[in-house]
Amino acid sequence: MKFSNGDSNRKKISIIVPFYNESESITFFYEALCPIFNNACDLDFEVVCIDDGSNDDTLNKLISITEKDSRFNIIELSRNFGKEAALTAGIDKSIGDAIIPIDADLQDPPELILEMIKEWKKGAEVVLARRVDRRSDSFFKRITAQLFYRFHNQFSSIKIPDNVGDFRLMDRIAVDALKQIPEKQRFMKGLFAWIGFKTVTIDYARNPRISGTTKFSGWKLWNFALEGITSFSTIPLRFWTYIGGLGAVVTFFYALFIVTKTLIYGIDLPGYASLLVVILFFSCLQLISLGMLGEYIGRIYMETKHRPIYLIRKHYGNTNES
Ligand code: UDP
Ligand code: MG
């Protein structure tokens, strides 16, 4: 990779920022980002902002930034498609030699961008930012995140690195690889891990949100976790085969026991309660396994519709038409 100060050879970095009702954070975000550009004056920057169907003042504020700063451009989505889709839109649109997805709420410190670029210049194709200090996240979020990573990595052959979010640098070669993945339901953390490439990790402490509140409720996070596990592993499906097998073995020995007991002691009528418990228990197991099957079938169904991942209402700013 060659870095030159000559204009035609200048490398470009695309910063990709999803915005969903972030009107209060935008000014802080802009002010935090500008010094970074000034510090990396051997590089060009573009900032691809995705307005993910915000219903506050986000779009207007972004437009006013685009008008005064030509590095910024906006993709306005037709509705709220979710962060994963918004990121995909930004990645598709970006033209930089490397991209950096970053949250709008300054939880991902922009200063780290310079460190990432340093590693990139040394030859890394992916630079991960690992949160070593998550004290700014709630206790519930920390515990559930930890459980998720442990559970996911146990079941999936693709290991998601612990405490690494979407904040990272990816060289164009990795971005092009990512763009080849056609699946519609995009669990970005998993897809990022799936593509591989030469990876370097740097550590950072996660800041609290600059303003506003998180857009991910407990229920949304639970669905997100299900999405992650079902996207990358079929072990939850296979699990029920083993449970069924184990149940059959236990039932066989129990049947032997009952037959022997009946032969020796004769017929023993009471047993209503135990019968009911066994029936209820196995009915529930069957329902759970059906539900699990349903999770996968639902995903196959959604995938076969081939709907686009996002729809764009309008582009603002420098549209990079090429
Ligand atoms: N976001 C988005 N669409 C959504 C939800 C969130 O584009 O449906 C953006 C949000 O504006 C922010 C980033 O994704 O820039 C991370 O969201 P948030 O800070 O709420 O998540 P958390 O940091 O709590 O995981
Ligand atoms: Mg956040």
Image (tube, rainbow, N blue to C red):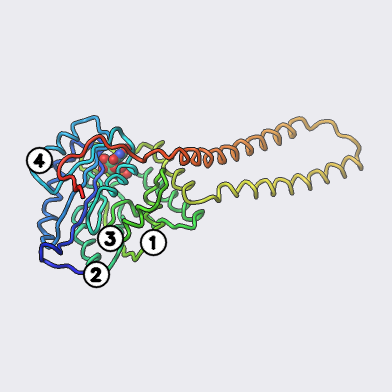
Give the foreground label among 3 and 2: 3
Residue 11 place in picture, x, y as percent: 18, 61
Q: Is residue 185 left or right of residue 296?
A: left
Give the labeled residue for mark 2.
122
Residue 171 place in picture, x, y as percent: 28, 60
Callout 3, which amino acid?
Asp
Give the labeled residue for mark 1.
196
Q: Residues within 10 Å of mark 4 (few under 14, many from 20)?
A: some
Question: Who comes first in sequence, dot 3 or dot 2?
Answer: 2
Residue occupying image coordinates x 14% and y 36%:
61
The reply to whether dot 3 and dot 2 touch (C-beta < 8 Å) is: no
Picture quadrant where residue 159 is located: bottom left
Q: Quadrant of the N terminus?
A: bottom left
Q: Is residue 82 left or right of residue 3?
A: right
The reply to whether dot 2 and dot 4 touch (C-beta < 8 Å) is: no
Give the labeled residue for mark 4.
67
Q: Quadrant of ligand 1?
A: top left
Give the labeled residue for mark 3.
171
